Image (spheres, helix red, strand yellow):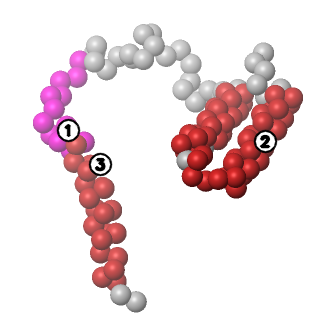
């Protein structure tokens, strides 16, 4: 087995790590660091935290997020299909109609199960 073939992959990984770490290191070295009470105070919502940060969330938050990602990714397949429709012919058209049918059946199923209802 020739390990020289893996040299470009190794270099690519090293460059990727360097590109990720170099700006952080430069910011830490060159950036001013004078913390005061206002800089270290909570800023996201404007008031002090009043509960534990590890409190439990309702599972519906996660369910809606997963369903959004799932259907968002499925609709992303429609754009290349629409662009290449004239080139893929009837086979591509029929396969996308089957995909869209599965998409609609899945959407109807989660709607029927009440996964999209928010009480």
Label 2 environment density (alpha carbons within 10 Å; few <14, some 14–19, many ≥20): few
Q: Give the magenta-colored segment's residue range.
A: 24-36
Q: Is residue 104 left or right of residue 46?
A: right
Where 13 falls versus 114 (above or below)? below
Badge 3 is on which residue? 20
Q: State if disc 2 and disc 3 touch (CB < 8 Å).
A: no
Name the mark nearer the viewer: 3 or 2: 2
x and y percentages locating residue 101 in the rendered image: 79, 41
x and y percentages locating residue 16 in the rendered image: 30, 56
Residue at 64% across / 41% down in the picture? 74
Badge 1 is on which residue? 28
Q: Is residue 30 left or right of residue 59?
A: left
Tell me which corner region of the image, top left, top right, bottom left or bottom right, holds residue 66: top right
Checking the image for residue 101, the label placed there is 2
Secondary structure beneath label 3: helix
Mark 3 vs mark 2, CA separation in Å = 42 Å
Q: Earlier in the sequence, mark 3 or mark 1?
A: 3
Q: State if disc 1 and disc 3 touch (CB < 8 Å).
A: no
């Amino acid at each position: 087995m020739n390990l020289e073939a893996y040299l470009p992959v190794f270099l690519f990984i090293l460059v990727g790590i360097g590109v990720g770490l170099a700006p952080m290191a430069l910011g830490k070295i060159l950036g001013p660091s004078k913390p005061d009470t206002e800089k270290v105070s909570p800023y996201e919502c404007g008031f002090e935290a009043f509960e534990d940060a590890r409190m439990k969330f309702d599972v519906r938050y996660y369910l809606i997020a997963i369903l959004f990602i799932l259907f968002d990714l499925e609709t992303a397949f429609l754009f290349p299909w629409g662009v290449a429709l004239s080139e893929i012919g009837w086979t591509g058209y029929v396969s996308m109609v089957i995909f869209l049918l599965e998409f609609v059946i899945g959407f109807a199923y989660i709607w029927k199960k009440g996964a999209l209802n928010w009480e």
